[in-house]
Image: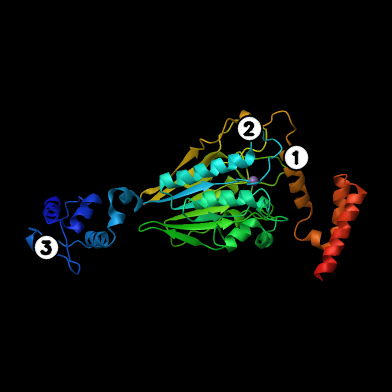
C-alpha cells in the first residue's frame, strides 16, 4: 500500500516521501519513483512499485520545491486568491461631509487591506478605479497610501475611474498620478481590449478591464462591460462605470446588469463607481459584484448605514467562491459624516454627468466658445468667469501651436 511505502521511505529519511505525505497524497494508487540524481537507492526496498504519471510528476516537483508542498502551502497550490476593493478616493484634505481626519482614515483602511492581503495569502490586489479623488492628488498622502498598499508585496491591478483622469479621458492618464504609478510599474493598469493572465499551477485566470471614459453608459454597453473568455479557467472583468442591479434616475446614465449579462463570458464582473454597492447578482452562473466604495462620502442613509468592505475571490479546481470582508477600521457612519450639511455629492455628480452628456465626442474641442456660452447660461456662471476661461483657452492654444 502506498502509505506503507511512504512509511518505508520515511524511515530512510527521504525528503520525497515526507513531502508527499505532507501534501496529503494518501491515495491507495501505490508508488513511485524515478530517483533524481543523487537520490539513494531506496526504491529497491519498496515492496510494490507502480509508476503513476501524475503522482510521479508531483513527487518530483515536491523534491525540487519542497516549500510549495509543505502543509500550509498545499491549499494555496490549488487555489488563487484575488482581493478586490474600489473607489478609495485618496485625497489629502477632508471631503465636505466628513468630520473625521479623512487622510488618517484612508491610511488606516489601506493598512487593514494590506493586512487582509497578507492574512489571506492573496495573489494580487484588484482595484476598480477612483483610486484617487483627483488626477494629481497631494504627494505626501499618495506616498503613504501607495507605500501601505505595496507592503502587501503582491501585484496591484487596476482600471482608471473618472476621478483618476482629466476630462473623462483615459488619454490623459500619462499626466495623472495613476498613470505615473503605472509607468513606474507600481500599479498595473489593465489595457482595455487586452487580456492579462494570472496563473497558478492549476488555475488560469483571464483578467480584463475597462477604464471610465466619456461614453461609458452612453454607448453600446457590450463594448465596455462584456468580454470573451479565452484559454483560461475563469474570466474576471473590471469596468469603471454605472453598472447597476436595478434602474436608477433617468437622467443619470447607467447600465443594468440584465442588459449585459447575456453577452459577457466573464465568470465575475467586478463593479465600481456606484459607491453604495449592492448585493451580488447571479445570472446563469455569472457573478456581478460591487462591494461599494471603501469610503463614505455622502450623507444619504444608504451610505451612512453601510459598512465599507472589500471582497476576497477564490479560484480553485472546483469552482470559484467569494466573501465580503467588512473593514474593522471603518467607524459607524454617524461618527464620521456630518449629517447637517447639504448633500452636494449627488448634485455635483449630476451636474458633471449632465455636462458630459451635452458635449460628447469631441464637441467641446470643435466649438469651445459655444459650449462655454451654453454652460455659463445653464449654470449661471458670471460673464467674467466665462471670459477668463476663454482667455486661458486662447492662451493655451497659442502656446501649444
Ligand atoms: Mn468613485
In whole angstroms, how far apart are the C-alphas of marks 3 and 2? 67 Å
**Residue 240 visible somewhere in the drawing:** no
Name which of mark 2 and mark 1 comes first in the sequence: 2
Above or below: residue 97 compared with residue 353: above
The residue drawn where x is 56% and y is 37% is 308
Name which of mark 3 and mark 2 comes first in the sequence: 3
Q: Residues within 10 Å of mark 1 (few under 14, many from 20)?
A: few
The residue drawn where x is 58% and y is 53% is 225
**Quadrant in the picture for the C terminus:** bottom right
Residue corresponding to mark 2: 336
**Residue 119 visible somewhere in the drawing:** yes
Residue 50: x percent and y percent?
A: 14, 61
Above or below: residue 274 compared with residue 169: above
Q: Nearer the viewer, mark 2 or mark 1?
A: 2
Q: Nearer the viewer, mark 3 or mark 2?
A: 2
Secondary structure state at the residue bearing disc 1: helix
Residue 246: x percent and y percent?
A: 61, 40
Residue corresponding to mark 3: 43
Name which of mark 1 and mark 3 comes first in the sequence: 3
In whole angstroms, how far apart are the C-alphas of marks 1 and 3? 76 Å
Colour theme: rainbow
Residue corresponding to mark 1: 347
Residue 247: x percent and y percent?
A: 65, 40
The residue drawn where x is 59% and y is 42% is 106
The residue drawn where x is 39% and y is 49% is 319
- From the viewer's side, name the closer residue of 226 and 49: 49
Amino acid at each position: 500500500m502506498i502509505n506503507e511505502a511512504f512509511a518505508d521511505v520515511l524511515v530512510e529519511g527521504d525528503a520525497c516521501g515526507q513531502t508527499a505525505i505532507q501534501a496529503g497524497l494518501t491515495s491507495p494508487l501505490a508508488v513511485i519513483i524515478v530517483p533524481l540524481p543523487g537520490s539513494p537507492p531506496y526504491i529497491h526496498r519498496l515492496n510494490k512499485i507502480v509508476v503513476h504519471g501524475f503522482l510521479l510528476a508531483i513527487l518530483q516537483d515536491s523534491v525540487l520545491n519542497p516549500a510549495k508542498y509543505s502543509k500550509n502551502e498545499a491549499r494555496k497550490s490549488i487555489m488563487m486568491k484575488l482581493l478586490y476593493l474600489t473607489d478609495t478616493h485618496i485625497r489629502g484634505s477632508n471631503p465636505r461631509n466628513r468630520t473625521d481626519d479623512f487622510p488618517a482614515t484612508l491610511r488606516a483602511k489601506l493598512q487593514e487591506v494590506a493586512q487582509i492581503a497578507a492574512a489571506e495569502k492573496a495573489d494580487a490586489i484588484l482595484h476598480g478605479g477612483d483610486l484617487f479623488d483627483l488626477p494629481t492628488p497631494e504627494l505626501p498622502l499618495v506616498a503613504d497610501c501607495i507605500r501601505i498598499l505595496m507592503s502587501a508585496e503582491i501585484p496591484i491591478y487596476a482600471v482608471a475611474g473618472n476621478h483618476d483622469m482629466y476630462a473623462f479621458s483615459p488619454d490623459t492618464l500619462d499626466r495623472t498620478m495613476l498613470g505615473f504609478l503605472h509607468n513606474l510599474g507600481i500599479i498595473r493598469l489593465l489595457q482595455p481590449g487586452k487580456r492579462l493572465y494570472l496563473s497558478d499551477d492549476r488555475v488560469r485566470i483571464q483578467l480584463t478591464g475597462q477604464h471610465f471614459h466619456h461614453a461609458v453608459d452612453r454607448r453600446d454597453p457590450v463594448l465596455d462591460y462584456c468580454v470573451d473568455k479565452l484559454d483560461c479557467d475563469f474570466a474576471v472583468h473590471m469596468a469603471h462605470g454605472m453598472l447597476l442591479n436595478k434602474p436608477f434616475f433617468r437622467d443619470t446614465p447607467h447600465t443594468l446588469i440584465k442588459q449585459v449579462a447575456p453577452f459577457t463570458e466573464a465568470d465575475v464582473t467586478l463593479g465600481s463607481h456606484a459607491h453604495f454597492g449592492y448585493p451580488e447578482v447571479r445570472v446563469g452562473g455569472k457573478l456581478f459584484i460591487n462591494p461599494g466604495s471603501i469610503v463614505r462620502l455622502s450623507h444619504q442613509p444608504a451610505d451612512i448605514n453601510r459598512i465599507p468592505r472589500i471582497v476576497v475571490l477564490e479560484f480553485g479546481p472546483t469552482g470559484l467562491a467569494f466573501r465580503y470582508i467588512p473593514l474593522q477600521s471603518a467607524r459607524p457612519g454617524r461618527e464620521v459624516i456630518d449629517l447637517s450639511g447639504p448633500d452636494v455629492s449627488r448634485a455635483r455628480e449630476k451636474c458633471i454627468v449632465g455636462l458630459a452628456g451635452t458635449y460628447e465626442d469631441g464637441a467641446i474641442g470643435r466649438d469651445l466658445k459655444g459650449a462655454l456660452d451654453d454652460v455659463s447660461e445653464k449654470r449661471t456662471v458670471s460673464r467674467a468667469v466665462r471670459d477668463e476661461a476663454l482667455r486661458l483657452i486662447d492662451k493655451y492654444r497659442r502656446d501649444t501651436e
